[in-house]
Image (spheres, rainbow, N blue to C red):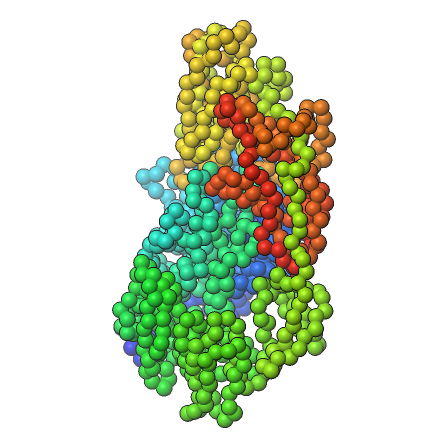
Amino acid sequence: MRSPTQVLALLGLVAGQTLVDQSSKYVASPGSLGFYKGNSSAAVTFDQYSLMLDGKRIMVFSGEFHPWRLPSIPLWRDILEKIKAGGFNTVSIYTHWGLTEGKRGVLKFDGYRSLTKFLDVAKSVGVLVILRPGPYINAETTSGGMPGWVSNLADASRSNGTDFTAAWKPYITQISKDAAPYQYPDGPIILVQSENEFGGDSVTNPWSYGHTDHMKWVQETMRANGLDKVPTTHNDYKPQGEYATGPAKVDLYARDGYPLGWDCSHPEVWKELDASLDADHQRLNPAEPLYLAEYQGGALDAWNGPGYEKCYQLLNEQFASVIYKNNYAAGISLQSLYMIYGGTNWGNLAAPVVYTSYDWGAAISEDRTLTPKFHEIKLHGLFLHATPHYHVAGRVSTGSELVSNPKIFVTHLATAEGQHLYVARQTTNANTAREEFTLDVKTKSGAVTLPGLALDGRDSKIFVTEYPFGGSLMSYSTAEVATWLTLDGQDHIVLFASNQTTKTVIPTTSRTKPTISGPGSSITATLSDNAVTISGKPPSSGLVRVSIGKTVLVFGPYLVRSATLTGSTLALVGDLTITWNGKSVKFFKAPSGTLKSTLDTPDLKPKLPDLKSLEWKCTDSLPEVELGFDDSQWILANKTTARPARFQPLGGKVVLYADEYGYHQGNTIYRGRFSSQATGVKLIVQGGSYFGYSAFLNGVFLGSGQSSNDIIETNYTFPTGVVGNDNIVTVVLDNTGIDEENWEGKSKAPRGIRGYELLGSGDFDSWKLTGNIDGEETQDIVRGPLNQGGLYVERIGAIFPNYTLNNIWNSSASCTPFKGINQAGIVAYKTKFLLNITETTDLTISFTSNYGPQTVFPIPEGILNHRGENDVLLTVWSLDAEGAKVAALELTSSITLDSGKEIVTGVTA
């Protein structure tokens, strides 16, 4: 540890600004083996500055990825390789309790739910892992990742209730046992998170009872089952110090941050920067490194939202430059962006707050293509990994004192050894104009004014002085550092700048004249006073090299996955719009010494089938409205009270909540019988935000409801002449998911018919209901418990490719989704098409429609068979008597690449 006296002497700090030794303030987590530097023999340790692996400081530069939102396992490697190529060394993952335990006591961790498969891929790729198993994860997924059956428990969720505790323990036990062999250094796991954004006990909130016990027991269960060689963490949803102290304290406290919020409708409007990161850190956990466990990498888009394109505009590469560099100015040493790749809410994964896409406006889009934000963040990662002294730099000053322009704000950081970092940004996020300035910096030779600096609107830059690279030193530069490397005993530093002149000074004892190579530019290099001074304006593209010696650079790839030098052969694997993977190419040596090659460009883009020209077959997917439909195998609704006391029925003799009868997702269908001469029916239906339903009497349409609210109450008058001696009211409901738990029991809000009443006379004699086939006993082992809903075509298995069409399917010319249905109801349409795309061609094919906010639905390879037959089933639900059709539906593709990714085979049907 440095001494306070050293820092004061070097930096001229007042005592309140000094980064002093805080280790005496650290209190270990109860029951932990201990991971604090100097008090632990663990491979993973930390102090107030950073995490350390085997005693070496590391910048944990992480992004969030949910493997279960990309159920094509071979593509996990593709995403992880892209994450690593983007400058990240770590990936943060949630595991999903609800996907693994659809029926209580039956845990399944196979296929896309396998934690060990993912950890094997991560280890192979060479990325570290932050494991976040919950048991509650939020994540905009149904019930926040808890199984549907948890909503039926009498205990409050996320409490110390006996039954709730007994419910989650088998899951956390198994996760811990599976993860234990993969803890660093034997595997990639470096941290494990307990719970998620979890509040403490509150005497004013009856739903928060037992939170401390719950948090403590989750950690104890992890450690008791072998997950004890890495620190536990927790992500506080705001900087309030939850579980930074106390009997449920974690080893390493963390917090979340979403500084620009969720208003994607106005992407040009930014909130001001959070200037309290460092102050909050010093207030809450100064003996630990500053860890942002979830930091804004994008934003969710809700139903009726503007679309993820707008979210990306809000949270683009400018956002990354300004906001993330503000974090570095605060001294963060662990940062995980939520999300780096979002994926897809396939099946019934989503909570009511989101729709199918989980793109998030992330750096890697849902279709796995890279955005400009990805490349901006990569520069940050390269710099931070190449600058270990960043971790031990203390804050010297903040404000505009060092610059010539008061519209510029600078944070000055420095180490006891004399290295300096200056993080410059606009004083206000509202300023989008170009601002030019000079900056006063410190060097070992004295004060220097850096000339010709500029920020183009929303931008931020990091300038360094006395910057070590290899055995060399850069005195200062007006360009930014990307990275450095040492090749054949020569030190090379990579600098970048845009739209400004630069000046760089590197001390040297060599008298050899510098050489310049690369695209035309105004760069000049002079040797004087034992230093090389490089000045001028770099070109807008390409690289300029000033050197004495040799180097190898790769120009222009979309992504380089790996580079391996074996003897005299440099093997490159990656993606380009022109191909070079695995093929011999001719090359020549440019005057600069760089190897160059011109490659043939194959015609990669395939011809995709025209969906309108295919042969479609159709069938009624709501035959349940007919009086004669056989519902003898349906469940008889016979419960008179619901287990969650807060959510009792709002009318009727029996409880009609789908969850009470084992149906937790997708469509639920009800049939209520009565023999009176009633004149109407009152229905109170609850299905989650933006749900819908339709009601029928004896096959005659009564009406539909849809709302942004999660509950709809309607009185229907029966049409004249429809009521007979035996009558059936049929209700089909679309469940948009179980609410996430907000410590108020919201995840227990029912789905289904909340209340009912016959109007005029009499009452219902009975109610029956059905949902996904077999309910919690689902036999679909491959896809898991959240894949299917309760529509007729789902229950008869018509959604599967091995289903054999029978005489209920019509093949007339009118049987196409583009002509649709001419009345209220649901019709299913089925077709097949072939694809023949080469194994090395990487593209994401999407179904594109005309109704938003989501109009493009990417289908990952493996779910879509790129080399064979594909089976498509589409349902059209008309909510009114006028009918409905699909106006447009086509197959489209995004960027097409000749790729070195893992060859993808189909997911087992």
- Residue 442 point in image, percent of width and height: 34, 80
Report whether residue 277 is seen. Answer: yes
Above or below, 663 against 867 in this view is above
- Residue 776 point in image, percent of width and height: 59, 32
Location of the C terminus (image quadrant): top right
Question: Which residue appears at 62% of the width and 24% of the height?
Answer: 620
Question: Which residue appears at 58% of the width and 52% of the height?
Answer: 894
Above or below, 12 against 643 in this view is below
Report whether residue 252 is seen. Answer: no
Relative side of 836 to 285, left or right: right
Q: Quadrant of residue 819?
A: top right
- Residue 645 point in image, percent of width and height: 42, 28
Above or below, 643 against 160 in this view is above
Question: Which residue appears at 47% of the width and 6% of the height?
Answer: 677
308 or 102: nearer the viewer: 308
Q: Quadrant of residue 801?
A: top right
442 or 617: nearer the viewer: 617
Location of the N terminus (image quadrant): bottom left
Badge count: 0
